[in-house]
Every structure is written in structure tokens, then in C-alpha cells.
């Protein structure tokens, strides 16, 4: 599933695999990371996180205060512009943040880059990541898959979050998931509830198989 072999990113030799998590504001990207942390720790993955915000470090501070991960393993990038700029057009700030983490933590296997909240056109540069996920949520509307934005279509894994809200917001969840799979063809779609942790183990397993090449 990787579109560029690990260790062959433009301009550098990487030892740690790098993955991205993108999606609209409020879709649950940080909540997903909070649930992924113990799942990856249980699988003995040595990892760190880089968060992106417009002009704050709020998501990074949330993870540092969580008690789930060594605060030194969380770095923050302040985009200062459209969130997709620093993950797609010019990802050098994020690349430098990942390089710094690899220097400070020898043996790091995985760096997770969380994008700032963006729109359905948001995608990751393959100079930055090997593999990336896009998070949408049920409360955003069941028409999102039909809009077929680049984020939905091009990501390696589409995540539909907040599935518990479907009956409360008038969303036909099976229909939404069917639309998403139809739009994406053979590319995977996973339904989760990041708040409760439902389905997050499946996401962690997919990361381990597709990115770290673990069974």
C-alpha cells in the first residue's frame, strides 16, 4: 500500500515510517490519536507525534497533558497559514520536526503527523508521509462521501468517526459507509467511535501491517 518505499523520501534517508492524519475541524483527529497511543504501545511500537495548528499549540498541549505519552515525544508545528500548506505545498517545517524527533529518540519506528483542521481537499505530500488517513465524522453529514473530495478519495485509509451519533443526527450509517466504499473502490474504510475506542484497534492493526510490515 505504500506509494514510496520506506527510507526513500525526497532529500533524506528515513529510519522511522511517517504517517499522516487529516480531516475537517472537529472530526476527531486528536481524539483518535489519544486512543491510538495505548493501542500502539500495546503492540510495542516506538513512536512520536507531531501536531499542526494554525497559530497555537493546543493539540500538542492536550496530548502532553493526557498522561498517555512522554510529553517530550510530542512536537508542535504552528502552520501560520492554511493547514494544508505545511503538509502538502511546503512540508519542510513538519519534515524538520520529524527529523528532530528521530535524532532525540534513536530507534523511533513511527512518527504520526496530525494536520490542523482542514477541508475535504486536504491531502498529504508523499515527501512528508508514507501513508495517511483522513477522518470524517457522522455529524458532518452523510453526504460527505458523495462529495468525493481529494481527502476522501486519495487517502490510504478513510475513517468515519462518531458512529454513535448517527441516530441522533438523522444519518443512515450503513448507507454512508456504503457510499464511502463505493467512492473509494478497493481502498479501505473503517467506522470508529474515538470517544469510546470502538474500532480503533482495527486502525492500529492496519498501521502495523501497512506501514510497519508487521503481521
Image (spheres, grey):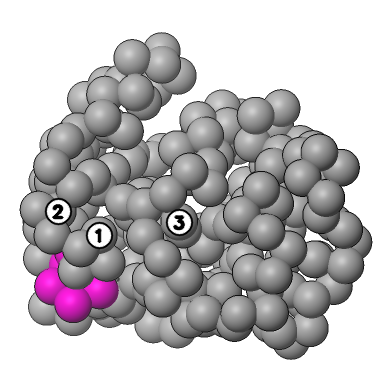
Q: CB under 8 Å between callouts 1 and 2?
A: yes
Image quadrant assignment for residue 47: top left
> From the viewer's perspective, is 142 left or right of 38?
right
Q: Residues within 10 Å of mark 1 (few under 14, many from 20)?
A: many
> From the viewer's perspective, is 58 left or right of 138?
left
Which residue does the numbered mark 2 point to in the structure image? 79
> From the viewer's perspective, is 74 left or right of 158?
left
Which residue does the numbered mark 3 point to in the structure image? 24
Magenta-highlighted stretch: main secondary structure?
loop
Q: Position of residue 151 (x, y in %)?
A: 49, 73
Q: CA distance from mark 1 to mark 2?
A: 6 Å
Q: CA distance from mark 3 to mark 2?
A: 16 Å
Secondary structure under tag 1 reads helix
Viewport quadrant of the C terminus: bottom right
Name the N-terminal-most of marks 3 and 2. Answer: 3
Q: Is residue 40 visible?
A: no
Q: Position of residue 102 (x, y in %)?
A: 20, 47
From the viewer's perspective, is the residue at label 3 or at label 2 nearer? 3
Which residue does the numbered mark 1 point to in the structure image? 83
Q: Position of residue 5 (x, y in %)?
A: 39, 79
Secondary structure under tag 3 reads loop
Q: Is residue 89 magenta?
A: yes
Q: Residue at x 88, y 67 (%)?
A: 175
Name the N-terminal-most of marks 1 and 3. Answer: 3
Q: CA distance from mark 1 to mark 3?
A: 10 Å
Q: Which residues are magenta?
A: 86-91
Towards the viewer: 13 or 54: 54
Amino acid at each position: 500500500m505504500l506509494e514510496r518505499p520506506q527510507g526513500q523520501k525526497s532529500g533524506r534517508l528515513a529510519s522511522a515510517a511517517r504517517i499522516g492524519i487529516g480531516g475537517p475541524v472537529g472530526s476527531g483527529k486528536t481524539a483518535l490519536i489519544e486512543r491510538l497511543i495505548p493501542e500502539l504501545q500495546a503492540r510495542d511500537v516506538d513512536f512520536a507525534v507531531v501536531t499542526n495548528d494554525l497559530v497555537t499549540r493546543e493539540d500538542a498541549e492536550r496530548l502532553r497533558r493526557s498522561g498517555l505519552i512522554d510529553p517530550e515525544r510530542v512536537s508542535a508545528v504552528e502552520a501560520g497559514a492554511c493547514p494544508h500548506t505545511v503538509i502538502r505545498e511546503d512540508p519542510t517545517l513538519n519534515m524538520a520536526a520529524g527529523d528532530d524527533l528521530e535524532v532525540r529518540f534513536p530507534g523511533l519506528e513511527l512518527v504520526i503527523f496530525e494536520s490542523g483542521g482542514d477541508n475535504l481537499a486536504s491531502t498529504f505530500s508523499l515527501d512528508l508521509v508514507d501513508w495517511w488517513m483522513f477522518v470524517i465524522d457522522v455529524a458532518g453529514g452523510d453526504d460527505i462521501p458523495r462529495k468525493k473530495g481529494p481527502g476522501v478519495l486519495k487517502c490510504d485509509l478513510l475513517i468515519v468517526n462518531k458512529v454513535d451519533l448517527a441516530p441522533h443526527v438523522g444519518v443512515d450509517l450503513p448507507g454512508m459507509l456504503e457510499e464511502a466504499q463505493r467512492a473509494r473502490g478497493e481502498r479501505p474504510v473503517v467506522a470508529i467511535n474515538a470517544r469510546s475506542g470502538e474500532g480503533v484497534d482495527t486502525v492500529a492493526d492496519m498501521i502495523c501491517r501497512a506501514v510497519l510490515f508487521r503481521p
